[in-house]
Amino acid sequence: MSDPSRAMMAKIEAGVRLESAEEMTPEYRENLVHLLTMQADSELAGGYGYVPWITKAPTVEEKHVVAQIVKDELRHATVMYGLLGDLGFDVETHVRKHDEIFTMRVEADADIGTARITSDKRVNIFYYPIDTWADFIFFNFCMDRGAGHQLEDVRGCSYGPWVRAIDGIFKEEKFHIRHGEHWVQKLAADPQTHAEAQATFDKWFIRTMNIFGRPGSPKNQVYRRYKLKLRDNDEVRQAFAHEVQELCDKFGLSLPAWKPKWRELPEEAHIPG
């Protein structure tokens, strides 16, 4: 281990957070940039996907809520791209190169497992379209909750600027989760919408379970060594699934069976939060 690497690891192991690119080894910076880009691209692509629901939401109040969620996601993207810019990443070129790609969606009945199918770094759940109000709600309920479980690790990570940025993002994501939870309870309790709620939950739960990555992933081991993540992928997934199970019991929904896809498809990168 070289002297710069040894000095950096000594700080990380002592719980001292890094604050600038000058303190990082190239490998640490490369992994950090990868994770930040995945979060930034996901925030931006997610915000774009919600935009149509400003006009299609069922009430004026809900149009306002959706507009606020879009605003939050675009703010989160701005914050994350700002962190990347501070590390010397060419944000403008990256976004300009991918801006049209961020709106690309697969067919509603597609099953892409864990595959990434474009050159941007968004989590692949953002390839799926949001075609109904129930889709919008269960995306809030599942994906925003799954992202929240991943963001918990970032709050204890080794890069100070990311930790501080996540604090504000996390508060807004909790609002999105509460919104989804309120509506899931409402849709599940109504006999006229219960069947649609269950069917919509089935697909978004399985898609969310696919975002966390493989147990024992070599990439995850690197992230944990650098304290960019704190837990194994499967620990985070099981924490998410346990919380959703408790809510399903409360709302009268059944948790669908989920089978991992990674034996069939190559490993893909996943969002840190």
Image (spheres, rainbow, N blue to C red):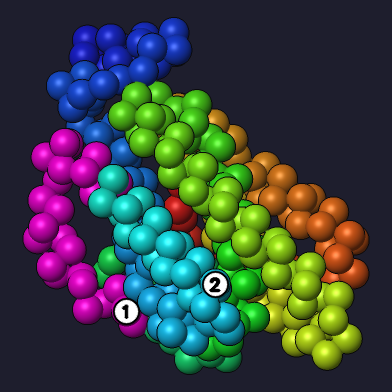
- Observer able to see residue 210: no
- SS assignment at label 1: helix
Left or right: 108 with respect to 10?
A: right
- The residue shown at (61%, 56%) is 177
Which comes sooner in the sequence, label 2 or label 1? 2
**Residue at horizontal 77%, vertical 50%?**
243
In this orientation, which residue lies closer to the viewer: 89 or 258?
Answer: 89
* Label 1 crowd bin: few (<14), some (14–19), many (20+), radius 10 Å: some
Q: Residues within 10 Å of mark 2 (few under 14, many from 20)?
A: few
Does residue 272 appear in this view? yes
Q: Which amino acid, by three-letter code, is at mark 1? A: Thr
Q: Position of residue 169 (x, y in %)?
A: 43, 44
Residue 251 sits in quarter? bottom right
Q: Which residues are magenta?
A: 80-104
- Measured along the vertical axis of the image, is residue 10 above or below residue 180? above
Which picture quadrant has residue 256? Answer: bottom right
Specify whether residue 40 is painted magenta.
no
Observer-side mark, 2 or 1, equals 2
Q: 76 left or right of 63?
A: left
User: Picture quarter containing residue 24?
Assistant: top left
Q: Is residue 91 magenta?
A: yes
Q: Nearer the viewer, residue 23 or 48?
A: 48
Please, what is the dominant secondary structure of the magenta stretch?
Answer: helix
Q: Which mark is residue 103?
A: 1
* Above or below 27: residue 252: below
Query: Whole-Å distance between the Cαs marked 2 and 1?
Result: 26 Å
* Percent coordinates x, y for residue 131 in the rendering: 53, 88
Q: Residue at x 28, y 45 (%)?
A: 79
Identify the amino acid type marked 2.
Glu
Circle 2/circle 1 CB separation < 8 Å: no
Percent coordinates x, y for residue 57 in the rendering: 53, 82
Q: Which residue is mark 2?
A: 61
